[in-house]
Amino acid sequence: MHIDAGGGDTLGAVIIGAVLATLGGFIATRFEAHLRRRERQRSAALLFGEVLSVIELLTSLADESRGRGDPYGGFTLRLTRALRAEIEVYDRNRESLYDLSDPAARARIHSLVARMMLTLEGFFDLTEEIKLAEAALGAMAADEPARAATSERLAVLREQRGQQFDFVVETAGDIKPVIAVVEKLAGRSFATYASIIRP
């Protein structure tokens, strides 16, 4: 009986080739998935870095505007509405937060924006209440008994609104260190907005 040794070598080469091809395919798939994850992380970091930078800038501008003329005049309110719109951009893209590999960064971004969102809602609710109280006070006669109570309530509402705004500004002060973390993930600086507005 004759055994073809060459046939065994060929079979072994085929098996080794198949194993190597499978292993190569597995490694290529894993590498591609890794690249996709990195690209998603970079895109998310770019998005949140820009959103946070704009939030920080708008808060700073609104705070400066509050220091001139009517503290809560038209320009300040337009800036705070723009700030709320930017927070809504974050809210619409919140799922992308999970593309960031750093859980601490995710938690810091979300808690920071959530605090600002809730405080801003309080600010706008109080602004509406103040308008109603001002209108009611304006419609009252000088000797109307309810005038003193309404005037007192108006003063309390204004003070509360100022406190809400102060908290928004205070919270925005926590943005810079978060942006520093996001910049590393994005591979770029987000100082562009501030440099354009404040050359």
Image (cartoon, rainbow, N blue to C red):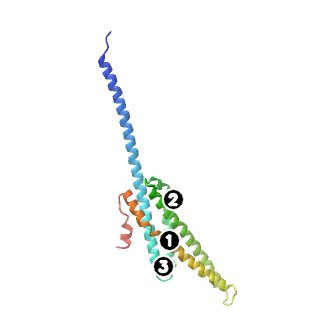
**Cα separation between marks 1 and 2:** 21 Å
Please report the residue visible at 35 percent of the width from the left and 36 percent of the height from the top: 24
- Residue 17 appears left or right of 117: left
Mark nearest the camera among 3 and 1 is 1
Q: How many marks?
A: 3
Q: Percent x, y for residue 174?
A: 45, 67
**Which corner quadrant of the image does residue 182 belong to?**
bottom left
Amino acid at circle 2: Arg
Q: Residues within 10 Å of mark 2 (few under 14, many from 20)?
A: few
Q: Nearer the viewer, mark 1 or mark 2?
A: 1
Report helix, strand or loop for mark 2. helix
Q: CA distance from mark 3 to mark 1?
A: 13 Å
The quadrant of the picture occupied by the N terminus is: top left
Expressed as whole percent of the image width and height from the top left, the position of residue 162 reads: 53, 77
State which tag comes first along the sequence, 3 or 1.
3
Q: Which mark is residue 92?
A: 2
Tell me the tag on residue 168: 1
Q: Nearer the viewer, residue 161 or 108?
A: 108
Q: Which residue: 33% across, 24% down? A: 12
- Tell me: 124 left or right of 2: right
As drawn, is 126 to the left or to the right of 55? right
- Mark 1 falls on what kind of element? helix
Give left or right: position of 80 versus 41: right
Q: Are the residues at dot 1 and dot 2 in contact (C-beta closer than 8 Å)? A: no
> 157 or 57, which lies in front?
157
Give the residue at mark 3. 66
Task: Residue 151: give x, y in percent of width and height.
Answer: 63, 84
Mark 3, Cα crowd under 10 Å, few <14 / some 14-19 / many 20+, is some
Q: Position of residue 149 (x, y in %)?
A: 66, 83
Q: Residues within 10 Å of mark 1 (few under 14, many from 20)?
A: many
Closer to the chain start, of discs 2 and 3, is: 3
